Image (spheres, rainbow, N blue to C red):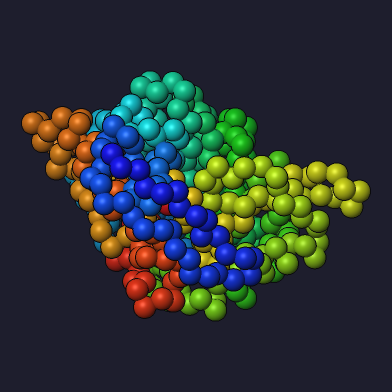
């Protein structure tokens, strides 16, 4: 296979984004034995599988108040299909870590079976899960015993009224109980994901950080992206990474971490106390204003088994027909998956980063339907 030139970084100077090129793509046909390469020289090693599109919250930055048309049970990937995809990913395509997402994964009644099966197949594979933690209080111990390593919990506010405004549900106590149970079960390092919404919870950022540090959790602030079901996203409504850092710096001292991000979406900062001692770390994921597309190493599979090479891809490649075809072997699945990733766009579903470009089009799905 002809090797594409290494892609230069798309990260813009802090405080703004600039359209940059990833270089000219290679025209070679993909070879599954080389892993999940794309034409810009990136290789996906981080697999994110959505287990279900359904969620028990209605977060304003994700879906409409009335919810969405949910997939039928028979449309969802089954336990053995999920295990097979992970096996193909790890043994053939070079996957090195797995994140289970949704919707809300805890809604799946067979979640423990899914995790136990994957762990039996891959004793050393890092397995994490993103969850809203509702129901986690009763399931955390079983998930840990099944083989789940750690969790990311979506939590945007510690105030009941603000939480209810953002999620359209009064469930904060359930979330906090789930977080406590997860920590007790050893599902650590536990990370908290927060989306700041202008005029709603942005001024709560320092308090949320202080709480996370005292609990021993790592908080990650995520810029709101145009993936809401209501399609009300506006660039000027996004609380930028620069604004987030400024909000936090009024209360704590931040020092940029010197560690290699290694393709991770979050830029991490050491949080220092008044004496300069390390209290913990905080991350900022700046998908909108400081995009990191050139080092993206993720491949996503939706709950019904479609490959999305990018969160904003216009194309989805179905694997279910092969998974359910008795004549199709693992090599056929791997090759189609590789071809789907070969077509990965340069950035944000188009030729360069930027949600205000004429070439950018919102995906037809919200975040809950794609899988985070």
Q: Residue at x 54, y 46 (%)?
A: 264
Q: Residue furthest left?
A: 327
Q: Is residue 239 visible?
A: no
**Front-lying residue, 89 or 339:** 339
Residue 28's x, y, as percent? Answer: 25, 47
**Front-lying residue, 49 or 21:** 21
Instruction: Please state if 275 lies on the left or on the right of 343 as rendered.
Output: right
Asked if 153 appears above or below 233 in the picture, the reply is above
Q: Residue at x 50, y 55 (%)?
A: 8
Quadrant into which the N terminus falls: top left
Asked if 76 appears above or below 16 in the picture, the reply is above
Q: Is residue 84 visible?
A: yes
Asked if 61 appears above or below 302 in the picture, the reply is below
Q: Residue at x 22, y 38 (%)?
A: 335
Q: Residue at x 26, y 42 (%)?
A: 30
Asked if 114 appears above or below 198 in the picture, the reply is above
Residue 150's x, y, as percent? Answer: 54, 35
**Front-lying residue, 57 or 146:** 146
**Front-lying residue, 245 or 76:** 245
Instruction: Please state if 199 lies on the left or on the right of 120 as rendered.
Output: right
Residue 192's x, y, as percent? Answer: 60, 49
Figure quadrant of residue 68: bottom left
Residue 95's x, y, as percent? Answer: 39, 34
Q: How many marks?
A: 0
Instruction: Please state if 279 lies on the left or on the right of 66 as rendered.
Output: right
């Amino acid at each position: 296979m002809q090797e594409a030139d290494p892609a230069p970084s798309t990260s813009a100077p802090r405080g703004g984004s600039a359209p940059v090129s990833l270089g000219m793509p290679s025209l070679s046909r993909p070879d599954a034995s080389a892993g999940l390469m794309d034409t810009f020289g990136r290789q996906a090693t981080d697999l994110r599988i959505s287990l279900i599109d359904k969620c028990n919250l209605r977060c304003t930055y994700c879906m409409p108040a009335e919810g969405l048309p949910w997939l039928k049970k028979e449309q969802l990937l089954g336990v053995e299909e999920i295990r097979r995809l992970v096996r193909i990913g790890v043994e053939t395509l070079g996957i090195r870590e797995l994140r289970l997402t949704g919707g809300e994964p805890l809604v799946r009644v067979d979640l423990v079976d899914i995790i136990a099966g994957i762990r039996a197949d891959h004793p050393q594979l890092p397995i994490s899960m993103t969850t809203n933690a509702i129901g986690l209080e009763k399931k955390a111990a079983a998930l840990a015993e099944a083989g789940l390593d750690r969790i990311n919990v979506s939590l945007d506010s510690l105030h009941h009224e603000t939480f209810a405004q953002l999620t359209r549900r009064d469930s904060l106590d359930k979330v906090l109980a789930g977080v406590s149970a997860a920590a007790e079960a050893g599902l650590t390092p536990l990370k908290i994901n927060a989306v700041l919404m202008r005029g709603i919870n942005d001024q709560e950022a320092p308090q949320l950080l202080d709480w996370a540090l005292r609990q021993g959790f790592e908080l990650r602030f995520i810029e709101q992206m145009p993936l809401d079901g209501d399609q009300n996203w506006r660039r000027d409504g996004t609380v930028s990474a620069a604004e987030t850092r400024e909000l936090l710096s009024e209360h704590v001292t931040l020092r940029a971490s010197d560690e290699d991000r290694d393709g991770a979406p979050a830029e991490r900062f050491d949080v220092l106390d008044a004496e300069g001692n390390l209290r913990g770390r905080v991350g900022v994921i700046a998908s909108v204003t400081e995009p990191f597309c050139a080092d993206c190493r993720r491949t996503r599979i939706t709950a019904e088994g479609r490959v999305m090479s990018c969160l904003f891809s216009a194309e989805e490649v179905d694997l279910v027909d092969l998974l359910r075809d008795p004549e199709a072997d693992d090599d056929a699945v791997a090759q189609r998956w590789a071809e789907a990733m070969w077509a990965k766009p340069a950035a944000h579903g188009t030729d360069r980063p930027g949600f205000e470009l004429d070439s950018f089009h919102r995906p037809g799905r919200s975040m809950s339907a794609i899988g985070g």
